Structure formats: C-alpha cells, structure tokens
Amino acid sequence: MNNTQRTVRVLTQRPYEVVIGPGVLERAQAFIERRSGAFIVLTDENVEPLYLEGLGLSDKERVLTVPPGEGTKSFEHLERVLDFMAAGGLDRASFLVALGGGVIGDLGSLAASLYMRGVEVVQCPTTLLSQVDSSVGGKTAVNLQAGKNLAGSFHQPCAVFADTRTLASLESEEFRSGLGEVVKSALIGDKELLARLEGETIALLDRDPELLGEIVERCVGVKRAIVERDEREAGDRKKLNLGHTFAHAIERVAGYGTVPHGIAVGTGLVLALEASQQSGTLRDGTLPERVRRLLDTLGIPVSLPVLRRRYDVALPGEDLLDAMRLDKKGTAGMPRFILVAEIGEVAVDCELEPGLLAQRFE
Ligand code: GLY
C-alpha cells in the first residue's frame, strides 16, 4: 500500500491544516498529546470500536459515545455534549476532538463553538462525505423540526486529520453518499477531477487508497479556495450548495435519514444541470449526460423516478416544492438555486420559473 500523506493549508482568519492519507490518525494522536489543555472526544457507537484506539487514548472517561445517525444532530444531544464538557472540567484552553462522520463533526463543532463562548475543535472525519466536505470550512449545526441544519454557527477547526484508511470500512451506501459530494466538488471547480473520476471508476469503487487520497485532497482544495474567499457564505461559498436546494427537499420529504445526504446531492446535481440547460444558463451542453453517466456508474440515482424506486418513497412534486420554499438558501419563500454554465463557472442565487421547476419533479 502506498502511504502518501498530503497536507492542505486553509488560510481562513485563523489558518489550519488538513492532513490527508492512510494512518494520519496517528498524527492526530501526536497533535493532541502535544497540546496543553483538557479535552474530550466525541464519537459514535459505530466509529468507537473501529477507530478510537487509533487515537491512542487510554482514558475512556474523556470519551462521549453517542448513537449514530441524523437523529443525534439534536438539541438534546448538544446539551449532553456540553454537560459532558462541563463535567470533565474543560475550560477555555480546552478542546474537543470530533471522531466520526458529518453528524459527529457538526454536533461536536457546534458544542465547541458554544462552550464558554468557544473552545477549539479538532476534526477527525471518518467518512468520505465528511473528509471531502463537512469537516473543512467551519460549518456547525443541529437540526430543527422545521429543517436540517437550521441552528448552527461558523467555527473553523484548529486542525483536520482525514485518515483515508477509515474509508475501507464504510458501508457501500455511505461510500456512495460521499461520492455525490465528490462529483459536486469537481463540477464547482476541478475539471481534471471530473475526468479522473470518469477514467478511474473501477479503482474508485474498489476504494484504491492512493486514488482516494488524491480525491480527498482535490475536493478539499476546491473547498479551501472558496472558503478562503468567503468564510461566512456572503456570496461565493454558496457555490458549495450546488444540487443542495433539490437535495434538502428530497431528504426532508423522504424523512431525514431515508435518503443519504450525498445520494440526494448526486440526484440534485442532475436536476440542477437539467435546470441550467432549460433556463439557458448552461454553456457546456455535454455536462448533463457526462454527469448522469458518471453518477449512474457510481450507483447514484440519476432521476427522481429512479430515486423514488430505489428508496421506496413517494416524493410527490407538490411536497418537494413546499419543502423548497422553506429552504434556508431561499428568501421570502422563494427557493434559490445554484446553476452551472460550465465546470468551474457556477451562478448563485438563481430563481427558476415555477413551471420549469414543476417539470423537474415529474
Ligand atoms: N457544505 C457546504 C459548505 O460547507 O459551505
């Protein structure tokens, strides 16, 4: 096995490094040991038996293990984490280590941003989706009844350790979910990445460690460039939401946790590309078919009918439209979309004609 480790430096107001590659949890361990200050580790019941040991922790009293799944991104669990930090005697010089996927990263970093008005968070993402997207950039969140990620803050991590060895143990559905976000990153800003994905689907689905390391590095590179320009999503960062207006509506109407986020994003990318074409925004007319073909090979539904059948959900068009009106990217009840002209050229805050939108939901 090749052991290449890669580092991406994110130059936000407080810069930090994203270290990527097989075995980087050992580097996380060294990083934690070097720091002064008390800490806790937040993880979930699936990840703890597999990877907690990789952090070399002997003191289990510092570890809070929560149930896996989207339901854990709640105020109830946020309070549990904050109480655990207080019971552990954490002070302002302390920090939290988030070991797990997107749920653990979002919940842990929100707790870190709130505890004593903010302590540091070290992200150790263990899913493809969290390595390529959610662990980098400082978004934190829990869900509300009214929608996903509606309560949160911006709180950049002080370091990210993305150990690509952890990707070998992911269930195929979870792995595919990460691939949806990978394709999104390629469309937003990495032409070569899209070509690599198309040319290397077999190695990709075999989870070739060297290829995965390169892919995570490229996706983090796309995100880094955007987040450095627009840390708090005043404009440019909205590009990272490509496919997400559709995806969030799908997740909400299906019931959170029914369709994995990255899978909904994958289908959302096709819908966004088709809408880009219909509205006349798209310049590269080959893209919808290229992306459909790639996603199909990767096992991601390329249309709503396929998604409905795969997950046995009705997803009525009217319900999807209603859900979109609640989307936090919208204003005054009007959903906003990210549309594509060509790879790397993406327009934010676009409106779509209601008739055109309804067609997408047939
Ligand atoms: N996942 C989108 C963002 O971090 O802005």
Image (spheres, helix red, strand yellow):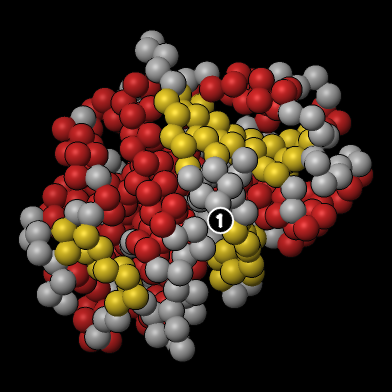
Q: Residue at x 80, y 41 (%)?
A: 93
Rendered location of residue 77, percent (x, y): 75, 54
Q: Residue at x 86, y 42 (%)?
A: 90
Rendered location of residue 235, percent (x, y): 40, 68
Asked if residue 361 is positioned above or below residue 135 in the image, the reply reads below
Within the image, what quadrant is residue 199 found in?
A: top left
Q: Residue at x 27, y 68 (%)?
A: 347
Rendered location of residue 150, percent (x, y): 59, 69
61 left or right, relative to 169: right
Q: What amino acid is found at the position of numbered circle 1 in the picture?
A: Lys
Within the image, what quadrant is residue 211 found in?
A: top left
Of residues 341 and 42, the one nearer the viewer is 341
Label 1 beta carbon less than 8 Å to ligand 1: yes
Crowd around label 1: few <14 · some 14–19 · many ≥20 (10 Å) = many
Residue highlighted by disc 1:
139
> Is any part of residue 19 visible from this angle?
yes
Asked if residue 216 is positioned above or below residue 166 in the image, the reply reads below
Where disc 1 sits, the SS reads strand
66 left or right, relative to 1: right
117 left or right, relative to 15: right
Within the image, what quadrant is residue 246 found in?
A: bottom left
Q: Residue at x 35, y 46 (%)?
A: 222
